[in-house]
Amino acid sequence: CNGGFITNPNYRRMGVAKIMGKVFLRAAKDLGYKSSYFNLVFKSNVESVALWESLGFERVAVLENAARLKGVEGLDTAYGYRYDLESLDDDYLL
């Protein structure tokens, strides 16, 4: 299972992304997925890296020089994050 999230700038630092991430995990498990993978979490996006790690995602891939991003000097590194949905408690968020 894969997903992508963008938080409106007016609602950042209010916990909205964490809520979206938690609901994503619950929905993915309920839909029968066994794991989730986010393949383009950029090193320069410190908030995104912190979010996925705080939710228990494991960094399983590092792609050096993966992309040229606006506002980032040189090429940015992309991380891949995986979550084992089978380890998610059945009563998570219920």
Image: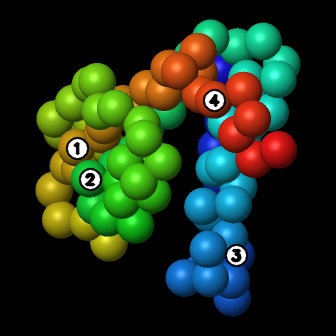
Residue ID at (18%, 65%): 73
Q: From mark 2 to mark 4, how far is it between C-alphas?
A: 29 Å
**Residue appearing at x 32%, y 64% in the figure:** 46
CA–CA distance in space, label 3 to label 4: 30 Å
Residue 86 position, x and y percent, is 58, 15
* Cα–Cα gap, marks 3 and 2: 20 Å
Dot 3 amino acid type: Asn
Between discs 1 and 2, the one toward the N terminus: 2
What percent of the width, then of the height, locates residue 26?
A: 74, 36
Secondary structure of residue under mark 2: loop
Q: Position of residue 74 (x, y in %)?
A: 16, 56
Position of residue 23 measured from the top left corner of the image (x, y, whole percent): 75, 47
Q: Which is nearer the N-term, disc 3 or disc 4? A: 3
**Label located before the other in sequence (3 or 1):** 3
Amino acid carrying label 1: it is Thr
Please identify the quadrant where the N terminus is shown. top right
Which amino acid does the dot numbered 4 rest on?
A: Asp
Q: Is residue 57 among what the camera can see?
A: yes
Q: Which residue is mark 3?
A: 8
Q: Residues within 10 Å of mark 2 (few under 14, many from 20)?
A: some
